[in-house]
Amino acid sequence: MILSFFAGLNLSPKWLISTTILDAQINEAGELYYLYKKEEQIFQPVPTDQSVLLAMSADFSGELEVLEEIIVAENDQGVLEYRQLSAQKHWGFWSLLPAFCAVLLCWLTREPITALLGGIVSGALLLGLYDLTGEVLIPTLGTTQTAGILILYLWFLGGLLGVWSKSGAALAFAEWMTLHVVRGPRSAKLVAWFLGVIFFQGGTVSTVLVGTTVKPIADKERISHEELAYIVDSTASPIASQLAFNAWPGYVQVFIFVPGVAFLATETDRIAFFFSSVPFCFYAIFAVLGTFLLSIEKPLYLGKRMKSAMNRSRSTGKLDSDDAVPLAAPELQDTVVPKGYIPNMFEFIVPLILLIAIAIGTFIHFGSPNVQWAFGIALLVAAVTSLVRGMTIKELIDGVSTGMKSLLIGSVILLLAITIGAVSSQAGGGTYLVALLGDALPWFLLPVLLQLMTMTIAFSTGTSWGTYAVAFPLAMPLAWAIANGQDLAHPWFFMTLCFAAVMDGSVYGDQCSPISDTTVLSSMCTGCDLMDHVRTQIPQATFAAILAAIVWSVLAFFAGVGFGG
């Protein structure tokens, strides 16, 4: 924090101008537009000779009034193209201090709230924002996104868990599954893995659904919370990127347009390229395979901490380590059903089916799942059913409030994780890493170096989608230029490998970062200590990442010499 304060007072930010080539079109009104998240973005281009960002000198430091421009210019073939210029500032390696502070404090103290607040303070001092409440917390937390998170994860999810606990529905479902489906820890973990594959809509959706559904079953079979959190987390974003019938292709395709590349010319072409690259996303494949092998207890590799957690839970029944601070309150562990109320597993199944059906239905109809609708209706149905079956309003509200209380600390951590992500983005940590590594990428190791770069950015910022926005505008034109400059035998194949490396490096970094929303939610919904989850997950995830790097390197060589694709 002292270093951040020093840098903020004495150093001026440097600027990196990133360029994204837009797939510009003309609408019926004759206006220029490009599609972003399936919506038309109208723009007026600036002539090249009037561009403020282009005229800026390479060594410029200070403050800029213009941070984004769209210019029109001719490329090398004499064709007009529209380029979106974005000015992103950074303080060199000092920009990594907020993320470094938060991650280091997480490891040292095992107390995430203090660690995240430390990282936020570090970032605020670097940015010169000394009013922490008014200039950092309120602007970040007082947003529609934050309100949506509070409503979804604190009110709806907490309320639903509370109703299920109060009515005994979750316990009844666990007992039925134990009697008819689950025959021990292996089959219980296979249920978790299978549900993770089915709930492929997105990282946060998957972690919440799978974690809350399987936890009562897993607890009954003495599966450690570290095991369950790892399975839930590694079948979230990896599956969402593999079975990408969700919002991922539409979001990513915006950043991978490269002029002159025929197979990336239109939105349809880019989405097709996304799906054709899925078989080469080897980290996601190895991560999902690794959790399957762990589920059947035949892992290729298992870290020491995970082995210890498995032995502890099987031999002693302790689901958490002795010094763990789980992100779910113990109230939900002990079901206290009102006297005379008979639990029924259909009180668990019907809201869950409704939740899934609404999430998938809204995705099919609107192009993205409306998770708030899904959880809100599921909570309403669960509450009404409990009242109809004889629960009093007082007992119902008691259950709802207990469920909300159980997720209060987890929700606070989630909000702080979002805040430090925003602060790290403003500090320019990802921008600095791109500037540092962007010109030092030999073609043969380009996929692996892109993987390492995006792993670092996503781990430092806690977001895979944010990493895509930073890395793809650099990675795809660079890969195409190298493929042509080195006269590679299969440029499409090489581009595919580079694309997959950016996708998977970002997923790995997001999945392993203690400041990522999916990491927090995986811990929250499985009742695991956050840092226990991080420590036990990283060895297996790193093993999968190393395997992926080896395969990408071999295939990149084949792409160059003529045996690929």
Image (cartoon, grey):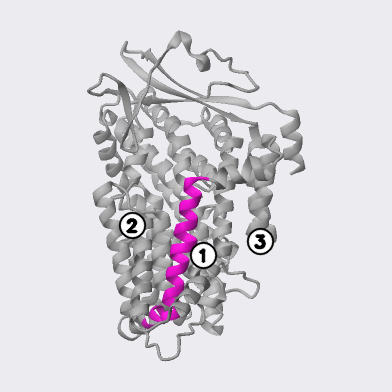
Magenta span contains residue 145: yes
Q: Earlier in the sequence, mark 3 or mark 2?
A: 3
Q: Is residue 64 left or right of residue 149?
A: right
User: Hey, what amino acid is under mark 2?
Assistant: Phe
Q: Find residue 115 and name its label.
A: none
User: Hey, what amino acid is under mark 3?
Assistant: Glu
- Across and down, in percent, residue 343 comes to 37, 85
Dot 3: few (<14), some (14–19), or many (≥20) neighbours within 10 Å? some
Q: Is residue 305 left or right of residue 229?
A: right
Q: Under tag 2, what secondary structure?
A: loop
Report the mark closest to the observer, 2 or 1: 1
How would you classify the magenta stretch by its main secondary structure?
helix
Asked if 484 appears above or below 412 in the picture, the reply is above
Residue for badge 2: 200
Residue for badge 3: 111
- Across and down, in percent, residue 395 comes to 47, 80
Q: Quadrant of the N terminus?
A: top right
Dot 1: few (<14), some (14–19), or many (≥20) neighbours within 10 Å? many
Q: Which residues are magenta?
A: 143-172
Q: Find residue 524 and name its label.
A: 1
Distance from the alpha carbon under mark 2 to that under mark 1: 19 Å
Front residue of 137/298: it is 137
- Across and down, in percent, residue 430 comes to 55, 37
Q: Is residue 366 left or right of residue 315?
A: left
